[in-house]
Each structure stands twice: as structure tokens, then as C-alpha cells.
Image (tube, helix red, strand yellow):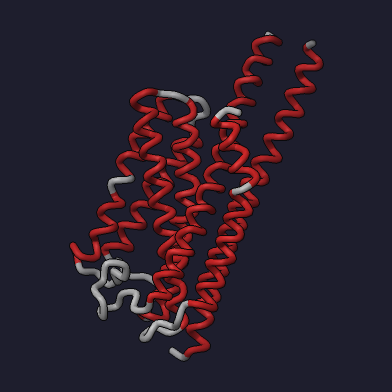
């Protein structure tokens, strides 16, 4: 059995069940195991999914940038399809970040939105990859548009390190929970760390399953287009 | 803000997450069904040619 066939077997028969089981375990940890945060109370439980949505979005955009770099260097349809699939899945998670963030901010900050550096940078990231998707939807098999898209993905991913350091660099309102020293708003209880890690595992599995499904759909779409072109040629 | 009010936000955030995920999966399912139709269409066109 080839490596691709083995991957397909795992992705189609193992990943959906593993992702579902891990997600149920994550929900169990979030609502039954993790303690209430001292200052925010139960609403802080949004944190476990909000942060993992952000990490999954970053993972998607990094995969897209890696595949785009490969596409620009060596070409190849597979790298381009992987980049497109990763951007779409990354955009799903980035949208989740931008929806769950304001819902969490309202009871804690007293406002749905503020132009905090990290929030602004995240909106910029979402916009860059939204432009990528619009660009890719414009050209069917246009190699030039694929190259522009690859360059845009490489430029867009540069925003992620800025998002990571923005809290320390520009001192915005957004908390830096993961890197906060003990006693200064970080994860005070070990059960919070365990919950975050269980949720992280669930999100990685969900990300991989969605990426595989989207990638396979794009591969099938392109294969159909090639056969369609050959049918048209045969008829002519 | 009172505790029940805050719980409403917790509920809203998790609902939004599942709604967005469900929307994405429905979108993927629709794309897949459209591709299945394309394959069937191609098969019938190939049958006509041959």
C-alpha cells in the first residue's frame, strides 16, 4: 500500500472518530474538570476554545505558506491544492477567533470591540487571507493567479509573529495568558493547563480532518476539470 | 455584570463555534455532492462519445 493510500485510510476512517472523541473529552474538561477562574468566573471557559481556534488558524496559515513556498520553488498542483485547502480551514478558525473574542470581551472589558494591537493585527490577517480566497476564486486554472496567491500567503503569514508579540510590544488590552508569570493572570491551576492541552489535541485532530477533506475535494475538482477538458477536445 | 448574564456569553461563544463548524461542514458536503454530479455528467458524456 502506498503512503498516500495509508494516509487516506487514516484520514477517512480514523481522524473523524478521533477528532470527535477528543472534542468530547475537551468539552468534558472545559465544563466539568477545569475550575472557575478567580476574577472572571465561568465565562473564562471561552478561553480554551478561543485560544485553540487562534492556534489552529495560525497552523492553517503556516501550512499554506509552506505549501505556497514549495509551489513557487518547485511548482506542482498538489502544493497549490494544499495551500488553498489550508487557507480555507485557517479562515474558518480565524473567523471563530473573531466571533468568540468579542463575545468574551463584552462581559470582561465592557465592550464588544476595541482597536487593540492584537485584535487589529488579527483583523488584518483575516483580511489578507480573505483577499487570497477572492483572488483564487477569480482564476480557474490560471498559473499566474496561483503564483500571486502563493506570494500573498507568504506575505500574510508574516502577520502572525506580529500578533504573537503585539501584546508585549504595544501593551494593548488583550491579556497574554500563556506567557504571563505566575500570579499575574496566567493559568493558575494545573487543571487549566491540562484542559488547554486536551483541547489543543482535539483542535489539531479537527484541523487535520478538515484539511484532508478540503484537500481531497480540491483534488477531485481539478481531476474532473482535466477530464472535462479532454472530453471537450474529443468532441471538437 | 451578574453571573447568569456572564453564563449567557459563555453559551453564545460555544454556540457560535459549533454553528460556524456546522456551516463549514455543510458547505463541504454541498461541494462534494456537486462534484459527484459532475462525475455522473462526465460519465454520461463519455458514454455518448464512445
The vertical placement of A147 against A20, above or below, is above
Does residue B37 appear to the left or right of A146 in the view shown?
right
The residue lying at 36 percent from left, 85 percent from top is A39
Where residue A4 sits: x, y (%)? 56, 31
Q: Would residue A176 be visible to someone looking at this image?
A: yes
Where residue A119 sits: x, y (%)? 33, 63
The vertical placement of A203 against A232, above or below, is below
Count numbered badges in the picture. Answer: 0
Q: Would residue A174 be visible to someone looking at this image?
A: no
Residue at the farthest left position: A169
Quarter of the image where the N terminus of chain A is located: top right
Q: Nearer the viewer, residue A70 or B36?
A: A70
The vertical placement of B12 against A69, above or below, is below
Does residue A29 appear to the left or right of A62 in the view shown?
right
Where residue A10 sits: x, y (%)? 59, 42
Residue at the farthest bottom position: B2
Where residue B30 sits: x, y (%)? 67, 45
The residue lying at 55 percent from left, 76 percent from top is B11
Quarter of the image where the C terminus of chain A is located: top right
Place residue A172 in its image quadrant.
bottom left
Residue at the farthest front position: A1
The residue lying at 43 percent from left, 56 percent from top is A94
Does residue A108 appear to the left or right of A20 in the view shown?
left
The residue lying at 38 percent from left, 75 percent from top is A190
Amino acid at each position: 500500500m502506498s503512503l498516500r493510500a495509508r494516509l487516506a485510510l487514516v484520514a477517512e476512517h480514523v481522524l473523524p472518530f478521533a477528532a470527535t472523541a477528543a472534542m468530547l473529552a475537551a468539552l468534558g474538561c472545559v465544563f466539568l474538570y477545569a475550575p472557575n477562574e478567580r476574577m472572571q468566573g465561568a465565562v473564562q471557559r471561552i478561553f480554551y476554545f478561543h485560544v485553540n481556534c487562534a492556534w489552529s488558524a495560525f497552523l492553517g496559515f503556516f501550512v499554506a505558506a509552506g505549501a505556497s513556498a514549495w509551489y513557487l520553488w518547485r511548482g506542482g498542483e498538489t502544493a497549490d491544492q494544499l495551500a488553498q485547502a489550508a487557507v480555507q480551514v485557517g479562515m474558518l478558525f480565524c473567523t471563530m477567533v473573531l466571533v468568540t473574542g468579542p463575545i468574551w470581551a463584552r462581559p470582561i472589558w465592557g465592550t464588544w470591540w476595541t482597536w487593540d494591537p492584537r485584535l487589529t493585527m488579527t483583523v488584518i490577517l483575516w483580511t489578507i487571507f480573505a483577499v487570497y480566497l477572492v483572488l483564487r476564486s477569480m482564476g480557474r486554472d490560471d498559473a499566474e493567479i496561483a503564483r500571486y496567491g502563493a506570494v500573498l500567503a507568504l506575505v500574510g503569514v508574516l502577520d502572525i509573529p506580529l500578533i504573537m508579540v503585539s501584546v508585549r510590544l504595544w501593551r494593548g488590552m488583550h491579556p497574554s495568558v500563556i506567557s504571563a508569570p505566575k500570579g499575574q493572570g496566567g493559568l493558575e491551576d494545573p487543571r487549566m493547563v491540562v484542559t488547554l492541552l486536551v483541547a489543543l489535541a482535539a483542535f489539531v485532530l479537527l484541523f487535520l480532518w478538515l484539511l484532508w477533506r478540503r484537500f481531497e475535494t480540491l483534488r477531485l475538482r481539478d481531476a474532473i476539470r482535466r477530464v472535462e477538458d479532454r472530453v471537450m477536445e474529443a468532441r471538437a | 455584570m451578574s453571573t447568569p448574564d456572564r453564563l449567557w456569553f459563555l453559551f453564545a461563544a460555544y454556540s457560535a463555534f459549533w454553528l460556524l463548524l456546522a456551516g463549514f461542514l455543510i458547505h463541504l458536503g454541498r461541494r462534494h455532492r456537486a462534484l459527484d454530479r459532475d462525475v455522473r455528467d462526465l460519465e454520461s458524456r463519455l458514454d455518448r462519445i464512445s
